[in-house]
Every structure is written in C-alpha cells, then in structure tokens.
Amino acid sequence: MIVSYGALVLWVRQVMRYFIKTYGCQMNFNESQKVDALLRRQGFEPVSSPATADLILVNTCSVREKPEKKVFSLIGRLKSPEKIVGVMGCVAQQYGENMLKKEKGVDFVIGTQALHHIPEIVSKALGKKGRITDTGFTDPETSLAVFREPLISPGVSAYVTVMQGCNRFCSYCIVPYVRGRERSRYSEEILAEVRDLARRGVKEVVLLGQNVNRYGLDRKGDLTFPQLLRRIEKIGGIKRVRFVTSHPADLDDEIIHLFGELETVCESIHLPFQSGSDRILRLMGRGYTRAMYLRKIEKLREVKPEISITADVIVGFPGENERDFNETLSLMETVQFDALFSFRYTPRPLTRAARYAGQVPEEIKLKRLQTLQILQSEITLKKNRLQEGKLKKVLVEKPSKHPEGFMMGRTRDNRIVNFEAPKRLAGQEIDVRILEGYQNSLLGKVEGVYVY
Ligand code: SF4
C-alpha cells in the first residue's frame, strides 16, 4: 500500500495527463465522469487527445458487436511503449485476463464492479509492476463505490446512476453476465448526491439503471423507485427528472401515475419494445406481449396525453420472418414513436439466442433495418413538425453548435430546440415558440421578457 501511495505521489508531481474514450450508453458515460473525478482528485490532469496523454482509458460496451469491434480497433491504434493503456467496462469484464493475452499493448483491465480501484491500479501500472486484471464481482456496496465520487463540473443536467445490473436475462443480452445482478444504491446516498448537484446549479437529473423501475427491490426497508421519485421532487432547485431505462414488464401503474402526480417528472419515456411479434418476444424472453406493451402506452397517454415515447427495436432476431417483421412495422404505425433506436441483431457471447437456430442472413437484416428506419424518419419528422407554432417550456443548456449566438435546450418532452439567446440564460426554464420542426431538432424563438 505504502509503496503504491509513494508511486502515486511521485507520478502526481510529474502531472500525469489522461484521456478517457467512452463507448456505449449513458451509464458508461456517467462511469467515465466518475472515474474522471477520481483521477482528478488524485492530481491527474485531463487532456482532449490520446496523443498528448500519458494514460489512456477505454471505457467499453459489449451490448452489440459493432462497439466491441471499435474497441479492439482503437486499442490496436493506441499501441505505444511510452503510454499506459487501460481497458474498463463491459468488454473488459467479458474478456478479463484474455484481453491482456490478446492485446499486448494493454497494461490493465478493470471490470464493471472494480472502477473504484482505478487510482491504485493506475499507480501500479505507472510503476511498471506488471500487467493487471481486476474483474472480480464484489458485494453490492463495494461494486457501486465509484458513484460516491462527486462530479467535477456538472452542467444544467446531470446523470445519477441509481442502480446497476439486471436480473431479466433476455435471451439476446449480455448485460446480466458482464454487469451482474441488480444492485441498488442506498437512497440516502442518491438523495445526498442530488441535493449536492442542486446546490451546484443542476436543474435536471437523469436517473440511470439497466432496469430503473426495479430500483430498491433488492434492498428491503429502503425506498422503492416511486418513493425515491417523490423524495427527489422535494429537493429545492431540481426542476426536472427523467429516468432510463424502463422495462415494459416492470413499468407498473404506480410509476405511470407519477407522470401525472409529480411536477418534476418530465413527460417523456424510453420504453424499449424490441419486436412487435409475440412469437419473437417469447423467444427473446421479454416477459410481455404486444398487447401488454400497447396497453402500457395507452395508460401513459391517458395520464399524460402529450408524453413523448421513444424505444429500442431489434430487427433480424433468430427466427424472425417477414410476418414478424411486418408486426414490428405495424406496432410502430400504431404507437407513432417520437424517436426510435433501431439495431440489427448480432449474436453476443454467453447468450441463449446466439445458439438459436434460424439466424437471419445479414442482407435481410440490413434490408429490414433500412425499411424500418425510413418509416421511423417519416414519423419523427411528422411529429416534430406538429410542434410548429406551440409555446414550449425549454430548459436552456448550453451554446448551440451552430449558428453563432444560438443556445440549445430541451423541452419537457425531450426535444432539442435551438434558439437565439445570450449564454447567461443557461439553467433557466424559458418560453420558446417553435418555428420549425426538423428531423432531429426544433428551431424556436424566445418569448417573454427575461432579465439578461
Ligand atoms: S432487461 Fe433484458 S435487454 Fe435490458 S439489460 Fe436486462 S437482460 Fe438486457
């Protein structure tokens, strides 16, 4: 220990520069933020390019084949005897020790439950104490320890991870194997984090978990997800709350009613449906039918008619035929999603579906994906155009990428709006008249008088 600490102090004096590359979802992004905070507290300095870094961390995602391939391609390009390269996250967990055998340029591998060990491991790696693997699963408390680290500079909106892991074991999904079973953080710890963020000017929190609606069910005596939302509602300064990801089988009536009951809960939900065919849903092991999914959508719209609904969908799951695929298209026509994240099925190691018969040829998957994406683009554009003329409450976030003098913000139903406004409006909720709806955003004009 003393030796590691000494080595760390030595390296800090030389001001070690680090770069983190993150692949995957919001949870990975939040983990990178926490690791970033951990390293900065130890005296490391972030840089914006791997070329100028002494330490490169790659935070990885193995949910699909493509991001996993990207990780190996990046690691191959990073090879350099002067730099320390560490791999963390799902691919690190999946490969473990084999990552070191496969990739000679990698100095250490840190699994999904060991991120809080990063300063110690980095210190050892910098001291050239051999190549290190730390991918064991630990107890729930220890596995979530990294989330206690406060964010360095939170913006207007901040992610707060409330739980990790998943117990559902959908037949195509690697997450339960690389993230482990559901583990919730103590509610007091989460509430303290949200209070701290509110004190530092955050106006919106996005609660994260693989199956966020099941928050707290693994902790007898602590708050459930609805109770947690009710407590966050009382924290002064927090104007908006969002949460991802909800599972259709775990989104119960109590949670649905919170969209009407709590002012902070924004009228938007991400509710993956994955397929419109009951036969495929059964093979996926999703735990709901098409009719059950549609009933949840109806209930959400009964409580909040203006709620925006986004989802994930997979095409080309093993055994999917044209009829199944057409049922997916018809579900999309019925629901009219505001946006959709669509993916081609790729077999993932360890999962049941990878061994299923009836794997769909790539060219058919691609054709179906294209058909589905064309349909969704039309629906998304139509729904964005329907916003034209409406007056929307927009939480101003930051300067827009273009043009100069414009800011970007989000409506409560999670649409991005660009409008001309001074930078100092960041953090305010203002009225914006929507002038035009595009494919991915809206153009607006500020209405009302604001003290600039
Ligand atoms: S609910 Fe299914 S798809 Fe989602 S993380 Fe769990 S196993 Fe994977």
Image: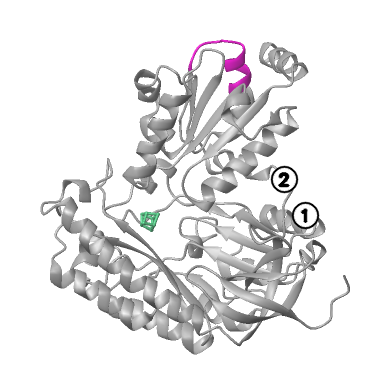
Q: Residues at badges 1 and 2 in contact (C-beta under 8 Å)?
A: yes
Residue at 70 percent across and 18 percent down: it is 8
Amino acid type, residue under disc 1 in the picture: Asp
Residue 194 % position (x, y): 71, 58
Residue 221 to residue 452: above or below: above
Query: 409 or 354: which is nearer to us?
Result: 409
Q: Is residue 13 above or below residue 205?
A: above
Give x and y (percent) for residue 19: 60, 32
Q: Is residue 225 left or right of residue 330?
A: right
Amino acid on which the number 2 mark rests in the picture: Pro
Using a 10 Å C-alpha cutoff, classify the residue at mark 1 as few (fewer than 14 neighbours), some (14 to 19) or many (20 or more): some
Residue 352: give x, y in percent of width and height: 22, 49
User: Hey, which quadrant is residue 314 in on the image?
Assistant: bottom left
Q: Which residue is mark 1?
A: 196
Residue at left offset 53%, top offset 85%: 306
Spatial CA span between label 1 and label 2:
8 Å
Judged from the image, the quadrant occupied by ligand 1 is: bottom left
